[in-house]
Amino acid sequence: MLSPAYCAKHSPRRPTCRSRWFQAVTNQMKEIPVSDPKTVKLLDGSSNRSSDLPLISGTLGPACIDIGTLYKDTGHFTYDPGYGSTASTKSAITYIDGDAGVLLYRGYPIEQLAEHSSFLEVAYLLLNGELPDKPQFDRFEHQITHHTMIHEAQRNFFHGFHYDAHPMAMLAASVASLSAFYHDDLDVDDPEDRKMAAVRLIAKMPTIAAACYRYSIGWPFRYPRNNLEYVDRFLHMMFEVPSEPLKLSPVATKALDLLFILHADHEQNASTSTVRLVGSTGANPYASIAAGITALWGPAHGGANEAVLKQLEEIGTPDKVASAVLRAKDKSDSFRLMGFGHRVYKNFDPRAKIIREMCHKVLAELGVNDPLLEVAMRLEEAALKDDYFVERKLYPNVDFYSGIIYKALNIPAEMFTVMFAIARTAGWIAHWIEQHETSGSRIGRPRQIYTGADVRDYVPAGRR
Ligand code: ACO
């Protein structure tokens, strides 16, 4: 539950907060005279050109300086590599307060959704802005259940991949190839078509993900079973073998559903921003989300869960933890503790807290005694009391524990980022839809500071 004090502190809509906030901004920018409490005046001393930049407030979080007219007014761009101070869009989907360790989907705290909701209900919430009532949820679930099949021709694509292709490579290619099957009736400007694309993507992602896995181990593909719910259907497609019936574990179902909820959205992270950038060109949703999948793959983003497990295996035993921490602090070594640190969270990642608890429960209930958990616990303990990590506010992130749970569920490390992609599809497509519903959306087109050669004349080859 968010405390009234928290809301008071974070909502610039409240008059007292608003004036406090403006005062803070004014203090921080002493050299910038503020002419109107709702604008920031930026004065370029060298040219005497100035720009009155409006301040924009959302429901929660700091106000933003709208720099849209800055170039026209002053001839200057802004420079913010990595976008540490830049809001790229307005969005009503997810809110993060990285300093307080708060994550809200459509206003609902992640802790409450993790405890009471399901992934499919969260997907509905992200897409529609409200929790569904029973008939709305039943309709949504029915739609998802009846769009899980992929075209037989698409199944054939898998045979073109080398047997040891990374599942993320197959996933990105397969999702992009959905564009080749659903292009005729897709108009990105039609709200119904956009909704249908969302249903198709959320429904087909587990089918494609399971096919990637089964192809990589040489097992026959499995068709989705309509009598199973979302997560069980996926587990069935992953693990069922022709020779014996599969016994689904409720612990596995619950754990996977929770992981999907926690990974469903995270505002303007690298992959979501990629989806929006590609979407801003008018590209179809399958192409946009395939781009998001490739962005997710990197070890600094969703690929971290695979990297965490590999690192824990490399560390191997609790007695090697101290030397791993030393290496991570050594600036001459590129080694980092995977699963630690976050661009936005400078406090405990609220998802990591939930996963940590779930991790212990899953291992206990499945009777798994994984020595890597001991290594993980020691690593967390050592990092949390080490000055280097404390000063830099480097806490375990969502990926630190997710890999251990996936491993306990017999999901191989190469599939970890694929699991993340299944869940994040709900967020990606919600953002893609929101972008198309926002009037005045423009193509994303950042500028640069050019540092190359000054203008020079071409020299013919013989005279170089
Ligand atoms: N281990 C050791 N040092 C670290 C780590 C780490 N995991 N993360 C950050 N640092 C250090 C940096 O070296 C830097 O130190 P300095 O100030 O002395 O130069 C400082 O902490 C700040 O780090 P930045 O790289 O500037 O932070 P940034 O916000 O750019 O990066 C990131 C965030 C990419 C998550 C980073 O912390 C990292 O690489 N972590 C490991 C990979 C990981 O777990 N990624 C998953 C993120 S969660 C997700 O995407 C789902």
Image (cartoon, helix red, strand yellow):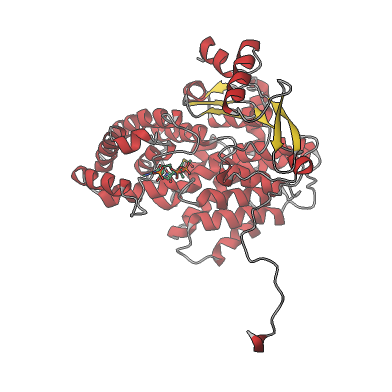
- In front of the other: 378 or 169: 378
Judge whether residue 222 can be spotted in this image: no
Say left or right for 417 vs 361: right
Front residue of this view, candidates 49 and 278:
49
Residue depicted at x 45% and y 63%: 164
Q: Measured along the vertical axis of the image, is residue 33 above or below residue 210?
A: above
Dividing the image into 4 quarters, which one contains the C terminus? bottom right
Tell me the residue at 69%/24% (across/down). 34
Give x and y (percent) for residue 318.
21, 42
Residue 358 appears in the figure = yes
Q: Residue furthest bottom?
A: 462
Quadrant in which residue 430 is drawn:
top right
Foreground of the two, 3 or 393:
393
- Give the percent coordinates (x, y) of residue 55: 70, 27
Left or right of 196 on screen, residue 409: left
Q: Looking at the image, which is closer to me, 147 or 319?
A: 319
Instruction: From this view, report whether residue 247 is shown above or below residue 160.
Output: above
How many labels were placed on the picture? 0
Q: Position of residue 389 (x, y in %)?
A: 34, 37
Residue at 41% from the left image edge and 35% from the top image edge: 252
In the displayed structure, 391 sits above or below 417; it is above
